[in-house]
Image (cartoon, rainbow, N blue to C red):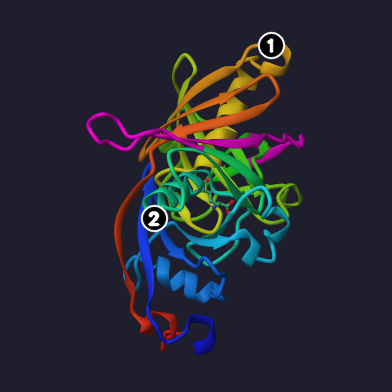
């Protein structure tokens, strides 16, 4: 890393979360930061850094090679990284928090907003604040689910379950269990087979029923470990549950809505008759500060 990639001036950051899936937000409108995986991991470290499940770099689409082609449709690109520094295609809670940041920074207003992601452009709607000043929820268009098919098995310890492979721009393996404790402590990634079903690894969701069109889940995220919520994962869960329940809006001609409880809160997800999925949930900015320049430099211990 050179001084040129960050300058000598400290960079600002913000911290935010959506259903307690938390992010370090780094505004970089002109795309000047060249963030290495090690630097992202350090910023996301909960002891030596700021702490987060992931990092959202806020870049003008025109200033980022992966998003320049989308600049005429979406001014801003969400450069999402997992807490281990790996890159992911999409983050459903992240895109709401990203929109909340733009609103707070005066770069977007309540209403409709398009955000470029590695999974394509996502349309976001920021609800107006309530009369009491409480921030409105944010609804994100999440695109369509892709179900590649093929048998998948998830194993934790001595127990295995069949899983459904659901791609929401990023990969998911959805497992129905009797009890969310069946997933164990999730300190390590569950084993998923066959490996060929997920060449770039996968997120794994464990699901139980809570009532009619109401489920609860836990998640082990690729690149981040167990988190308190995963928006794309909740959408994958919604689709897997609807299909299990015999509900496919493209067949029935009726949209279907599920409530998905996560350890950090609640998401409401609707699939319409075109297969398009929308997710509504909170997005909160909790802090703003300055990154000490020393945090950018490699840690002496490596
Ligand atoms: N927490 C996110 C998903 C983040 C990416 C994921 N870990 C991956 O590697 O695909 C969400 O809210 O969707």
Considering every residue shown, the one lying at the far left of the view is: 132
Picture coordinates of residue 240 (x, y %)?
Answer: 61, 28
Question: What main secondary structure does the magenta stretch of the protein show?
Answer: loop
Viewed as shown, does residue 15 lie left or right of 145?
left
**Other-residue count near label 1 (Cα within 10 Å), few / some / many at <14 / 14–19 / ≥20:** few
Q: Residue at x 51, y 47 (%)?
A: 95
Q: Residue 32 lies in what quarter of the image? A: bottom right
The answer to whether 275 is drawn above or below residue 69 in the figure is: above
Picture coordinates of residue 33 (x, y %)?
Answer: 53, 75
Q: Residue at x 37, y 51 (%)?
A: 104
Viewed as shown, does residue 52 lie left or right of 86?
left
**Disc 1 secondary structure class:** loop
Q: CA distance from mark 1 to mark 2?
A: 41 Å
Residue 93: numbered disc: none
The total of numbered circles placed on residues is: 2
Q: Earlier in the sequence, mark 1 or mark 2?
A: 2
Q: Residue at x 38, y 66 (%)?
A: 13
Q: Residue at x 65, y 62 (%)?
A: 62
Whether residues under marks 1 and 2 lie with C-beta atoms below 8 angstroms apart, the answer is no
Q: Is residue 159 visible?
A: no
Residue corresponding to mark 1 = 253
Viewed as shown, does residue 275 lie left or right of 35?
right
Q: Is residue 30 magenta?
A: no
Residue corresponding to mark 2 = 105
Q: Nearer the viewer, residue 63 or 210?
A: 63
Q: Nearer the viewer, residue 161 or 126?
A: 126
Residue span colored magenta = 125-153
Picture coordinates of residue 82 (x, y %)?
Answer: 52, 60
């Amino acid at each position: 890393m050179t001084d040129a990639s960050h300058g000598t001036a400290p960079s600002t950051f913000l911290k935010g979360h959506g259903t307690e899936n938390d992010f370090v937000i780094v505004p970089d409108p002109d795309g000047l930061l060249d963030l290495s995986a090690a630097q992202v991991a350090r910023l996301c470290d909960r002891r030596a850094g700021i702490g987060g499940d992931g990092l959202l770099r806020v870049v003008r689409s025109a200033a980022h090679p992966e998003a320049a082609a989308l600049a005429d449709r979406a001014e801003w690109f969400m450069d999402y990284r997992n807490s281990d520094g790996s890159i992911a295609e999409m983050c459903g809670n992240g895109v709401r928090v990203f929109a909340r940041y733009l609103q707070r920074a005066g770069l977007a207003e309540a209403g409709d907003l398009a955000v470029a992601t590695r999974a394509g452009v996502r349309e976001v709607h920021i609800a107006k604040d309530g009369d009491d000043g409480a921030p409105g929820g944010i609804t994100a268009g999440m695109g369509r689910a892709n179900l590649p098919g093929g048998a998948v098995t998830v194993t934790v310890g001595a127990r295995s379950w069949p899983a459904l492979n659901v791609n929401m721009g990023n990969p998911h393996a959805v497992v129905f269990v009797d009890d969310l404790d069946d997933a164990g402590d999730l300190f390590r990634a569950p084993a998923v087979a066959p490996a060929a079903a997920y060449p770039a690894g996968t997120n794994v969701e464990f699901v139980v029923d809570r009532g009619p069109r109401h489920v609860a889940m836990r998640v082990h995220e690729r690149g981040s470990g167990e988190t308190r919520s995963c928006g794309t994962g909740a959408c994958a869960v919604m689709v897997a549950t609807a299909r299990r329940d015999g509900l496919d809006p493209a067949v029935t001609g009726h949209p279907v809505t599920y409530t998905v409880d996560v350890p950090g809160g609640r998401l409401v997800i609707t699939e319409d008759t075109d297969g398009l999925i929308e997710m509504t949930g909170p997005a909160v900015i909790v802090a703003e500060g300055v990154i000490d320049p020393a945090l950018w430099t490699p840690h002496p211990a490596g």
